[in-house]
Image (cartoon, grey):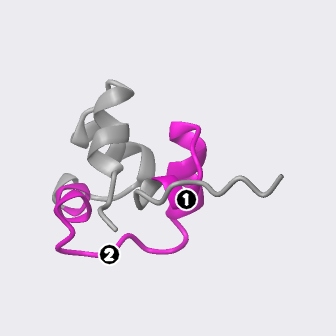
């Protein structure tokens, strides 16, 4: 699965620096997350999902399964 963080960030019009400030991390950390060099800490995933109005699965490029 491909991390979709960059896609969601750009679609929201947020820079790496702005996202880093919102999450209280360095811009280089956000860059590392986007390239997949470093995994996003589990405590940041719900924050990112809420920020971008998506699911954690969607951040990882997983299609949602319709359970109905």
Residue 8 image-quadrant placement: top left
Q: Is residue 14 visible?
A: no
Q: Does the magenta stretch include residue 47?
A: yes
Where residue 66 appears, as percent x and y from the top left, is: 71, 52
Would you say the residues marked 1 and 2 are in contact, meaning their CB atoms lie under 8 Å apart?
Answer: no
Label 1, secondary structure: give it: helix
* Location of residue 18 with respect to 41 vertically, above or below: above
Side of 13 relative to 43 (left or right):
left
Q: Nearer the viewer, residue 64 or 45?
A: 64
Side of 66 relative to 41 (left or right):
right
Where residue 27 appears, as percent x and y from the top left, is: 20, 52
Where residue 52 appears, as percent x and y from the top left, is: 51, 38
Give the residue pinned by disc 2: 39
Q: What stretch is highlighted in magenta?
A: 29-58
- The earlier-in-sequence mark between 1 and 2 is 2
Label 2, secondary structure: give it: loop
Looking at the rendered structure, which numbered label has been put on residue 3? none
Residue 50 image-quadrant placement: top right
Q: Magenta-highlighted stretch: main secondary structure? A: helix
Disc 2 crowd rating (10 Å Cα; few below 14, some 14-19, many 20+) is: few
Q: Which residue is drawn at 39% across and 27% down?
A: 12
Marks 1 and 2 sit apart, C-alpha to C-alpha, by: 13 Å
Side of 67 relative to 26 (left or right):
right
Give the residue pinned by disc 1: 56
Q: Which residue is drawn at 35% across and 43% down?
A: 19
Foreground mark, 1 or 2, reads 1
Q: Is residue 52 visible?
A: yes
Q: Which of 16 and 12 is in front in this view?
A: 12
Q: Nearer the viewer, residue 31 or 67?
A: 67
Q: Residue at x 34, y 28 (%)?
A: 11
Q: Which residue is drawn at 52% across and 62% down?
A: 45
């Amino acid at each position: 699965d491909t991390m979709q963080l960059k896609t969601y960030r750009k679609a929201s019009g947020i820079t790496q620096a702005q996202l880093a400030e919102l999450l209280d991390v360095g811009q280089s950390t956000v860059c590392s997350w986007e390239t997949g060099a470093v995994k996003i800490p589990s405590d940041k995933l719900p924050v990112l999902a809420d920020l971008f109005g998506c699911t954690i699965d969607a951040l990882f490029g997983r299609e949602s399964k319709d359970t109905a």
